[in-house]
Image (spheres, rainbow, N blue to C red):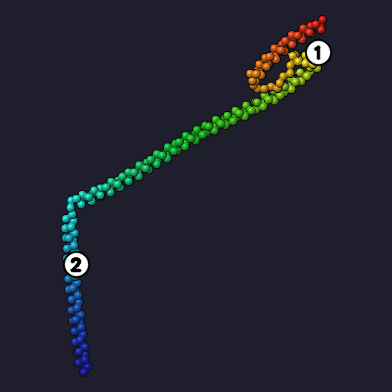
Amino acid sequence: MEDEQKREAEAAEQRMAHRIQCTLMECAREKMQAVAEARKQEREAALKEAARQHSMSAEELYRKNIEQLNTEKCHEFNIALSITQKENQIETEKQLKEAETVHLDELEKVLATLKAAEEQVKTLTQELEKMTDWKDSLESEIQATRQAFQKYIDATFPNLSPGQADFILPFRKAFEQKETPEEAEDSDKEYKRTSIRSARFTAMAKQNYK
């Protein structure tokens, strides 16, 4: 009984193995068929594409070539433009730097000239201050001399009326750096009047002396 069951099991295993082998063979055959079909379809697609490309008109090819040429030319133009802009930028920066250098040189010259002018103005101011001090001193000295001379005139000629001896040392205004034409004319007239009074005083002095 056991032997019979064993034989049936072995027979079942053999049948199963046979079916599996048949199935594998069928799969392999179907795979080969599928690969062949795919290759066939690829060949047909390639032939169709080649036929399509060959069937393109000359005008279409010319248009595509022109578009490609335009694209290339635009690219070349953009490169050339970029190079030109870079060169212009470098040249502009160079000119700006040169202009800045020249401007700095001119600025230094102007500053040097301004400094020299300031020193000159300072020197002139100092000299003017010295001249002003000297003028004030001279004015004071003249005023003192006039007062002393007036005392001498008053003591020597007590009979003279006030103001008759002013022509000898006439009263003068404070020193001014520039006279107007009217002031110059008044000074000339005063000088002439002083000369006349001086001549009269000399004659009167001679008579008193006698």
Q: Type of residue at label 1?
A: Leu
Q: Mark on residue 38?
A: 2
Circle 1 residue? 160
The tag earlier along the polypeptide, 2 or 1, is: 2
Residue sitting at 57 percent across and 29 percent down?
117
Tell me if mark 1 has few (under 14), some (14-19) or many (20+) residues whose alpha carbon lies within 10 angstroms of its own: few
Determine which quarter of the picture holds residue 142. Answer: top right
Q: Type of residue at label 2?
A: Ala
Q: Compare residues 124 and 173 and report the one nearer the observer.
A: 173
Q: Does 195 sit above or below residue 142?
A: above
Residue sitting at 71 percent across and 21 percent down?
173
Q: Does 181 sit above or below residue 79?
A: above
Residue sitting at 75 percent across and 20 percent down?
143
- Is residue 152 in view from this perspective? no
Determine which quarter of the picture holds residue 112. Answer: top right
- Is residue 176 in view from this perspective? yes
Residue sitting at 20 percent across and 83 percent down?
16
Residue 50 drawn at (x, y percent)? 17, 58
Quadrant where the C terminus lies?
A: top right
Q: Secondary structure at mark 1?
A: loop
Q: Nearer the viewer, mark 2 or mark 1?
A: 1
Q: Does 172 sit above or below residue 122?
A: above
Q: Compare residues 99 and 186 and report the one nearer the observer.
A: 186
Q: In whole angstroms, how far apart are the C-alphas of marks 2 and 1?
A: 155 Å
